[in-house]
Amino acid sequence: MFSTFGFLSPMEIVIVLVIALVIFGPGKLPELGKSLGQGINEFKSATSGKEEAKGDRDKA
């Protein structure tokens, strides 16, 4: 059997999405996805910022 994300099969992903739809409702899911995306972007920028600051400190 193939896996999409390495640990979840496509059927498991569908089940998780259906449960999320039942819990949060169709109106809340876009807001939830948007806030999740913003959180991931902030995390990426924070981790890359630490690497840049570390590199600047080593140069000095």
Image (cartoon, grey):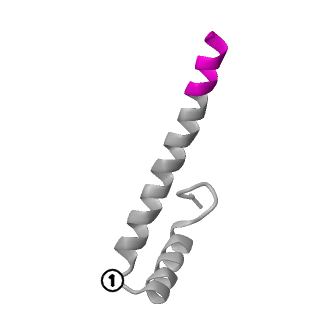
Q: Please provide percent x and percent y for residue 3.
A: 57, 58
Q: Is label 1 in a helix, a strand or a loop?
A: loop
- The stretch in magenta equals 52-60
Give residue 16's position: percent from left, percent from top.
Answer: 53, 76
Q: How far from the left and from the top, in percent, is residue 40? A: 50, 53
Magenta span contains residue 14: no
Q: Is residue 53 magenta?
A: yes
Going by the numbered disc 1, the residue's amino acid type is Gly
Per the image, the residue denoted by label 1 is 27
CA neighbours of label 1 inside 10 A, class few (<14), some (14 to 19), many (20+): few
Q: Against 32, is 40 above or below?
A: above
User: Which residue occupies 41% across, 67% down?
Assistant: 33
Q: Does 49 sit left or right of 32 as displayed?
A: right
**In the picture shown, does residue 28 fall above or below 6?**
below
Name the residue rendered at 47%, 82% in the picture.
Answer: 18
Looking at the rendering, which quadrant does residue 1 occupy?
bottom right
Residue in view at x 66 percent, y 15 percent: 58
